[in-house]
Image (spheres, rainbow, N blue to C red):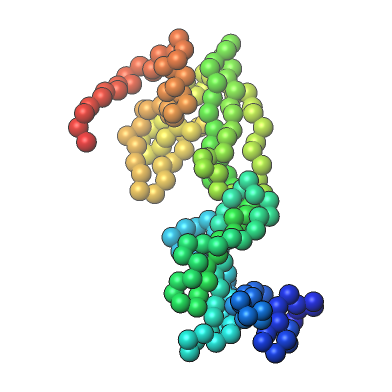
Amino acid sequence: RQVSNPPCYDRELKPINTYICQKTAHGYAVDLGHVMGYYPLQNSTYGLEIRFSYGTKCNSKSRQSVIKLLCDPDIPIGSFEADEPLEFPVCSYNFIWRTRSACPLCSEEDYSYSFTDCEQNVRTKIYFWLSPKKCAGGLSLPMPEEVSCSTRDTLHCGPGTHLIENCTGCPPGRYSVGGGQSWNKNDWEMAKNSSNRLPSLFISSCTDDI
């Protein structure tokens, strides 16, 4: 690592060519790691871990720094800050950096859709991001589109298929006896808060059992 105008100097006032350093109370600096490595973020698929190793000796081992890049679609660049605990284990320093640059590109798996009420046999299909949103860039939300009510309301699918917009095969590990309709949370809320009624043969019940 070669740095022009390095911000840190060692106890001999020589510049430290490193990515990250720490100034001591004595006025000189120590290297917190000048060899960079990239690793998957533990316990999460939304981020990245960057380790800077082979820093200045510390208790018979080299200092190192770990920066966890965390996906946050609302922060364009961001900056790193101290994590808790800052130093753990000894001579290893921990930081976090929230930024949209740590997010995967948006794909069709990151959004869903709902339908408005039917008016004159037409309803609007509206797309929305799944919450919490964990992607940035990539695909944009499709524009709203008008679809026929009759197709979705009257089409019945056979065994092994389910209704999305048309009859679609069940994904691996799922099954269907056929003949059903597709209702999501938004459909349910609209049915409760409007003159709509649940489709025929649709049965619901409540229980206190856990």
Q: Nearer the viewer, residue 85 or 207?
A: 85
- Picture coordinates of residue 75, whole percent (x, y): 64, 49
Provide residue 150's location: percent of width, then percent of height.
52, 18
Nearest the viewer among 58 and 160 is: 58
Q: Nearer the viewer, residue 41 or 185?
A: 41
- Does 48 sit left or right of 190 as displayed? right
Q: State the residue lying farthest toward the left.
A: 209
Tell me residue 139's x, y (percent): 65, 45
In the rendered picture of this protein, how many numbered marks are placed on residues?
A: 0
Which quarter of the figure has residue 116? top right
Q: Residue at x 52, y 40 (%)?
A: 130
Residue at image coords 26%, 24%: 206
Residue at the (46%, 65%) spot, across then down: 85
7 vs 183, left or right, is: right
Quadrant location of the N terminus in the rendered image: bottom right
Relative to 199, does residue 18 appear above or below in the rendering? Answer: below
Which residue is located at x 60 percent, y 23 percent?
124
Quick check: can you spot residue 90? yes
Locate the C terminus by quadrant: top left
State whether residue 154 appears in this view: no
Residue 60 image position (x, y, % from top left): 48, 89
Residue 142 located left or right of residue 193: right
In the rendered image, the vertical position of residue 166 relative to residue 48, given as above or below: above
Q: Is residue 131 above or below residue 12?
A: above
Residue found farthest to the front: 26
Residue 182 location, quadrant: top left
Q: Quadrant of residue 159?
A: top left
